[in-house]
Image (tube, rainbow, N blue to C red):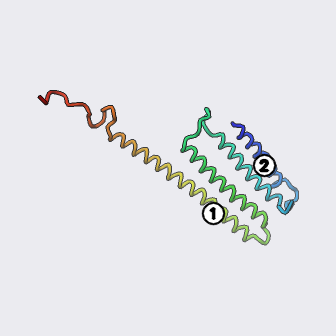
Amino acid sequence: MSRFAKQLLGVAAVAGILGGVLAFALEDENATAAGLELRALGLVLLAVALVLAAGAAISSVGSEKGEPLDVESTRTITGLVAVVAGIVAVSAIAIVTATLLGAGDNRESTVAITTSALGIISTFVTAYLGIKATANTSDKATAAAAKMVDKLTPDSSGGGNQSTDPPQGGGGK
């Protein structure tokens, strides 16, 4: 694991512990500091810790020899990171907003926000999986077409369907 990944994991651990304490261990659930509810801040810190830990895990992906990843692996990882970051961001916003509104008189607003957040998350995941499935199918079709072309075209050694050898026997002068 690289030094950067280790540092990222360290920051994620600190953010996670601090977020956990603020979100779940405070005695006063309505504690505020500088106009922010500490519970909501803790939940956001937990989400940040998850993103940082995912970043550390992704940065350590690669070959053991330190060679760069191929294009397809990089596309897969970056697409997954984008989806996870979007889900975490929408979830954090929904959690903070629902926490700030509370469950009292604003139940309808809380339900609307939660429902909207789940709709956005399901759209993210569906779009990612649909694009990934289409890309995989396209890659397989391209590989199959290339294989068929290789079967149908003669190779340069003369062993294909058409012979490049001169005719045998005497048929001339």
Q: Considering depth in this image, is 101 or 71 the residue closer to the camera?
A: 71
Residue 33 placement: quadrant: bottom right
The residue sitting at the front extreme is: 173
Residue 87 placement: quadrant: bottom right
**What is the x, y in percent for residue 30?**
85, 62
Q: Measure how far apart labels 2 and 1 are at the Cα level.
A: 28 Å
* Left-right relation of 82 to 28: left
Secondary structure at badge 2 equals helix
Q: Residue at x 83, y 61 (%)?
A: 36
Q: Residue at x 77, y 56 (%)?
A: 43
The residue sitting at the left extreme is: 173
**Residue of label 2:** 15
- Mark 2 vs 1, N-terminal side: 2
User: How many C-alpha atoms fall within 10 Å of the one at disc 1: few (<14), some, or many (≥20)?
Assistant: few
**Residue of label 1:** 119
**What is the x, y in percent for residue 59?**
66, 42
